[in-house]
Image (cartoon, coloured by chain):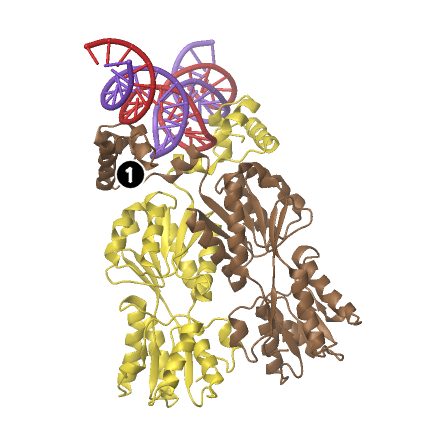
Chain colours: A yellow, B brown, C purple, D red
Amino acid sequence: MTTIADVAKYTGLSRATVSRVINNYPHVSEQKRELVRQAMMELGYYPNSAAQSLRNQKTGIVAVLVPRLTNPFFTSIIEGLEVIAEKNNLQLLICQTKASKQKELSFLKLLKTKQVDGLIFTAIENEWSKIEPYVDCGPIILCNEYQDDATVPMIKLDQYNGSYMGTKHLIERGYKKIAFCGGGSESGLSLDRKKGFLAALSEAGIKGEDKWMFPFVYNIGDGKKVMKEILAMDDRPTAVFTSSDEVAAGIIKEAKDNNLTVPEDIAVIGFDDQAIAQIIEPEMTTIYQPSEEIGRVTMEVMIELLNNKAQSKMKMIYELPINLVIRKST
Amino acid sequence: MTTIADVAKYTGLSRATVSRVINNYPHVSEQKRELVRQAMMELGYYPNSAAQSLRNQKTGIVAVLVPRLTNPFFTSIIEGLEVIAEKNNLQLLICQTKASKQKELSFLKLLKTKQVDGLIFTAIENEWSKIEPYVDCGPIILCNEYQDDATVPMIKLDQYNGSYMGTKHLIERGYKKIAFCGGGSESGLSLDRKKGFLAALSEAGIKGEDKWMFPFVYNIGDGKKVMKEILAMDDRPTAVFTSSDEVAAGIIKEAKDNNLTVPEDIAVIGFDDQAIAQIIEPEMTTIYQPSEEIGRVTMEVMIELLNNKAQSKMKMIYELPINLVIRKST
DNA sequence: CGGTTTCATGAAATCGATTTCAAAATTGAA
DNA sequence: TTCAATTTTGAAATCGATTTCATGAAACCG
């Protein structure tokens, strides 16, 4: 491998001068600068990034923790993160946690070992107290997910309002018996969605039924399962509020396979507005989340923190709006 | 930050001994070993990975180049790669190329700068001659994609046979006017699919029509566009062979929106067997690709190469089978 | 022209780990 | 008890870059 020393020897200059050229520093005569550039070309020299990281005490890498890459919502957030990261010469290290607490903590070690400069959560399984000890190791940001006791910046979407609007829409269409699919957590995003849902219900004087509340529902398969459970009920809901378009797709498919018509027999509202929402029949009413945008904003905040090391531990909340897209499944 | 020197001072031992404990080397008395472990705990010490990378001349990171994360086929490959990588303590650096030649080359620099130990292509835009110069920097593997002149291991699926089977299936169902959607490249995977398609046609004595060949078709939107073009034709095909389930979904949706019935008016066959294939109506006939498995095999080969530095530049071809899943869109 | 700035350059220290080699400590055998 | 063999330990070199500090050269000024 060619090192900076090789380039130095080849040009007859010192390593210091070569380094200055690499980093575009001043105080190198134009003539020598060109000489070094030539030499680097001819020798095929590229600076060793481990050495640079060690010396500069930074890696130019930001970790992004994602529960599942197969969920387009998260890959879309990544798109947004990436756009800004690239502009700032940052690499993303995408880490799939599979919603495992243990994996989450193990990825946090990337911060401890200085393998990354900062870390972004797009979902959290652990309690904040488990994460807290890592905030000294570098900026941590919550993107999409949030927790009350967290002491770091959070970029969130207005989940409460989103699910309130969606539920209200169902009620306005005349549905009163509404089921709810949510995540597993009783905090942050999951909780706010539930609150928004219940708020819309109670505002309309409707009492939520516990038997129609489905937690831990995440993907197409889960959606199908929920629909099967509903089919087995004597007293069935006439509408379902879901936690994602994938879940909604599973529910709609299972309903159709059992000769129910959507929305006549059962209405379904999605969450996210992914591509699948416009592919499925009937096209899906859903709650649009600006996923790319939340990614972009998050990365901008991250860049900010990486530059002003000072206030990385400050609690800040950015909230982006969310809106209803009415199609034909409700 | 606490360093190995801090731990050494704290225990009254040398850095060498601490290092031996970190790496579980022999020749440390059990008593001192325990002492060091305690100290590391108490000081919250974690080895700096830049320093380790520099000294060990390896990073424990493998880059994976993917055209688009939003395509579930690729995320599914990643799943497979990850399973094996994790078992071997390797981190994946997932790089989205957006099918850009330039991005591809820019990610190859990760090898030059020793930011990663090896690199996996899941698609290639550049000619092999552009990639060739990088093979000295570390193992490169082609996963799914392949090129005749490449001098590295390739793990491929039998694309020729896959598309041959799919096309033959359409012919057996009685379709004779068959359109073809493919990628842009006239080599590797794209070419083999086209060859398999044409072989099945000519075997049945059918002549392929140029006007029904659609290159550069990748996602749902592209599929919709293709269907629009077909609708505008006087002489329309009665079946479409597609390059992915996403494309097929776009085609089916657009057909239905224009009051065509699938498969009666137009049959559509997908490629990949993603979740969407079973959600869309009618459920999609498609060609199953063992995407997770190809990922697993690829990473196993990578591990092999990382261990036996010797033969990383050898050309090898692994081929996995592929098979037809008949549902209702044909 | 002497003296002060400014600019260009290099020697050596540094980042935090691992490894080699030699010395010290321990064990075992006679 | 003595000497050889083995185990344990540490000092210093090393990985490849960046940065500080010192020095010499060039430019500038009255």
Residue A276, image x and y in percent?
A: 50, 73
What is the secondary structure assignment of the residue under circle 1?
loop
Number of residues whose C-alpha sits closer than 10 Å to that of mark 1, classed few (under 14), some (14–19) or many (20 or more): few
The amino acid marked with disc number 1 is Met
The answer to whether residue B71 is seen in the rendering is no
Name the residue: 49% across, 75% down: A277
Q: Quadrant of residue A188?
A: bottom left
Q: Quadrant of residue A322?
A: bottom left
Image mark 1: chain:
B
Residue located at (54% from left, 37% from top): B309
Q: Position of residue B146 (x, y in %)?
A: 64, 52
Location of residue A241 (image quadrant) = bottom left
To which residue does mark 1 refer? B1
Quarter of the image with the N terminus of chain A in it: top right
Instruction: Establish if A96 lies above or below A112.
Output: below
Q: Quadrant of the C terminus of chain A?
A: bottom left
The spot of residue B103 in percent (x, y) is 57, 50
The foreground one among A155 and B188 is: B188
Left or right, B160 with reference to A79? right
Q: Nearer the viewer, residue D19 or B97?
A: B97
The x and y percentages for residue A250 are 45, 76
Residue drawn at point x = 65 percent, y = 64 percent:
B162
